Image (tube, rainbow, N blue to C red):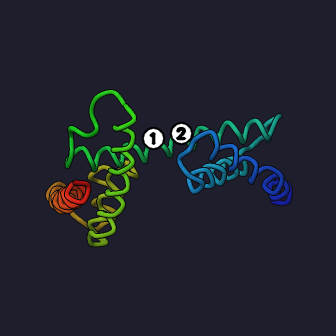
Amino acid sequence: MNDQQLETLFREHADALAVYLSRRYPAGVALADDAVSHAFLKLRDQAVSPRNVAAWLSTVASRRMLDLIRSEARYVSALTSAAEPDMVTGPPTLSRTTTRSLNAQLVHHVLQQLSSRDRELLTHMYQEDGDQRSVAATFGLSVGSVGRTMARARARFRDRFESAMERYRAAKR
C-alpha cells in the first residue's frame, strides 16, 4: 500500500473510527485517537493489504484501545493501591467506581507535584511496563540502585497522595 492510498483511507475512516471507539469505550478521545493512529501505522507496515480494510482497522484499533485502557488501569491501580489499599478491593460498585475516578484524578494531580525525574521514573515503571533494567538504561542508573530510587519515588508519591486524600476528606466533611 503506498502513501497516497494510506492517506485516502485515513481521511475516509479515521474520524469515524475515533468516534466509534470513544463511544464504545468511554475512556476518552485521546486514547481513541492513539488507538486509531496505531491501527493506521500497523496498516502501513502490513506486507499484504487486508481484504476488508475497514473491518481490519476497527479490530486493530479496538484491541489497541483495550490495551491502552488496561495499561492505564494497571498504572492507577499500582499507584493508588500503595496509598489506599482498602479503596480498590472488593467487587466494583457505584461508590467504588466513583472512588476510582477520584483516585485517578488525585494520581494525576500528585504526579504533577512530583519532580520531573520521579514522575518519569514512576510513569516508565508502571505505565510503560518497564522493568528495572529498562529503567536503569533509560535513566542512566545502575541496576542495583533502581530499587532504592523507585522506593524513594514511591514513598514521595505515597506521602503526597495521602496528604491530598486527607485534604479531600476534610473538605468533604
Q: Quadrant of the C terminus?
A: bottom left
Q: Is residue 169 left or right of residue 14?
A: left
Q: Secondary structure at mark 2?
A: helix
Evaluate whether residue 150 shows in this view: no
Residue shown at 28%/50% (left/top)? 79
Read off the residue under disc 2.
Answer: 66
Is the residue marked by circle 2 packed among few (<14), some (14-19), or many (20+) residues within 10 Å? some
Residue 18, position as x, y percentages in the image: 68, 50
**Is residue 121 shown above or below 58?**
below
The front one of 145 and 125 is 125
Residue 23: x and y in percent read: 64, 43
Do residues under tags 2 and 1 come within 8 Å of each other at their CB atoms?
yes
Give the label on residue 70, or none: 1
- Residue at image x 17%, y 54%? 147
Q: Quadrant of residue 99?
A: top left
Count the marks: how many?
A: 2
